[in-house]
Image (cartoon, rainbow, N blue to C red):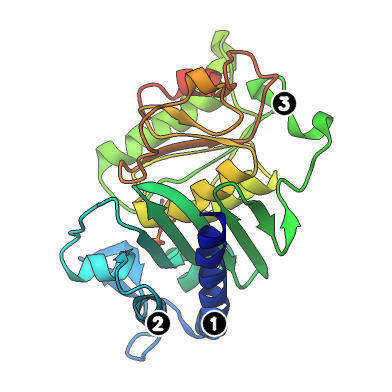
Amino acid sequence: AREQLQAYLDTAIALAKEVGPVFKDGFWRTGQFAAGNDFAAIDKMGNEADCVTAVDCHIEKVIFSRLREIYPEHKFVGEETTAEIGNEYKVTDDPTWVVDPVDGTNNFVHHFPYTGISIGLTVNKEPVVGVLYLPILDELYTAAKGLGAQLNGQSLPLLNSPALTTPTALSQCAMLSEHGSLRSESYIKSRFDTFQRLLLEKEKGGASVRNLRITGSAASDLALVAKGAAEIYWEAGPHAWDYAAGVVLVLESGGAVFDGAGWWGSSIPEDERSLQPLNIWKRKILAIRHMPDLPGKPGSGHEIQKQLAADV
Ligand code: LIP
C-alpha cells in the first residue's frame, strides 16, 4: 500500500509540474479587464466574486485526461467539470481524484500570488494524497498518508523548535480564514460575526486569536498551517476540491483537522479521534497545527472549537 501511495503521489507531482508553465504564463495574461480575449475572467452565474478562466478549464482537462489514461478505473471530481454538469458529483469508496485546477481564481485574476493547482486523492472517502503547487511563489507542497509532508523536498513543518511551534494560549495563534464568494447579507454577516468574536473574546474574559489573515485560497491556507506560518485555518463553505489536498498536508505535518463531526491527526489522542473517515464533502473545516500546550486539551483544538462552536 505504501508503494501504491508513493506512485499516486509521484503521478500527482508530475502532473502539477506539467501544468505549471501554463499556469505561470496565464497568470500574467489573465485579467478582469482582458474582456473579449481568451484570457478574460468569466463570472460564474453572474457572480463577479466567483469566476473562471480559460486557464482553469485547460488545466483541469489536461490533468483529468492524463489521470484517465493512467487510472481508467478511478473516479474524478474537479471544480470546473462539476460546474459544467450542474454541480453534481457522486462520492464513492473508489479512488477519487479531487482537483482544483486554479484554487484562488480571484487571486489569479488579480495577480495575487496565493493561487495554485490542488490535486487530492481519496480512497474509501479518506484523503490520502495531497499536492499543492503554487507556481508564482515556487512552492510545491506534497504529502501522502504515512509518508509525511514536504515543501520543495523539505519536511514539514519547517519550524521545529518547540518554543516556536507550540503556542500556550489562543492569543499566540495566527488564524487564517476566508469570506468565500457568496454575496448574501446573512452569509457574509455570519462569517464576520465569527471573525469579530474570535478577535474580541478576550475583552469579555474569554480567549481571542492574535490576528486574522485572509489569503483568498483555502488550499494555500492549509499549506501555510502545514508549513508553520499560521496555527489555525477555519472556513465554512469551501468545496472539497479547495481542501482535499490541503488536509493531507496538515495531517502529515503533525497537525489536526476537524470537519464538524470529529478530529483527525496523530496529535489527537487515539481515543479522541473520530472513527468515521474525514468528511471533506461537508464544506466545513477547521485545521490546526500541533499545539499540545494550548489549554482545553485534548488535541488543543477544543479551545478553538469552543470559539467556533456555532459555525463548524
Ligand atoms: C476559493 C477558495 C476560497 C473560498 C472561495 C473559493 P476558487 O476557491 O479557495 O478559500 O473562500 O469560496 O471556493 O473558487 O478560487 O477555486
Mark 1: secondary structure: helix
> Which three-letter amino acid code belongs to the residue tagged 2?
Val
Residue with the most extreme top position: 205
**Label 2, on which residue?**
62
Whether residue 131 is visible: no
> Which three-letter amino acid code belongs to the residue tagged 3?
Pro
Picture residue at 47% right of the left edge, 32% below the top: 195
Q: Earlier in the sequence, mark 1 or mark 3?
A: 1
Mark 1 lies within 8 Å of ligand 1 (Cβ measured)? no
Of 27 and 127, nearer the camera is 127
Mark 2 lies within 8 Å of ligand 1 (Cβ measured)? no
- The answer to whether 112 is drawn above or below residue 42 in the figure is above
Mark 3: secondary structure: loop
x then y, percent, for residue 221: 55, 49
Q: Work out how far the residue at label 2 is from the one at label 3, CA to CA, in angstroms.
A: 42 Å
Q: Which mark is residue 167?
A: 3
- The answer to whether 267 is drawn above or below residue 57 in the figure is above
Q: Which mark is residue 38?
A: none
Kindly indicate whether the residue at mark 2 contacts the one at mark 1 (C-beta within 8 angstroms): yes
**Label 1, on which residue?**
18
x then y, percent, for residue 287: 52, 37
Badge 2 density bin: few <14, some 14–19, many ≥20, Cα 10 Å: some
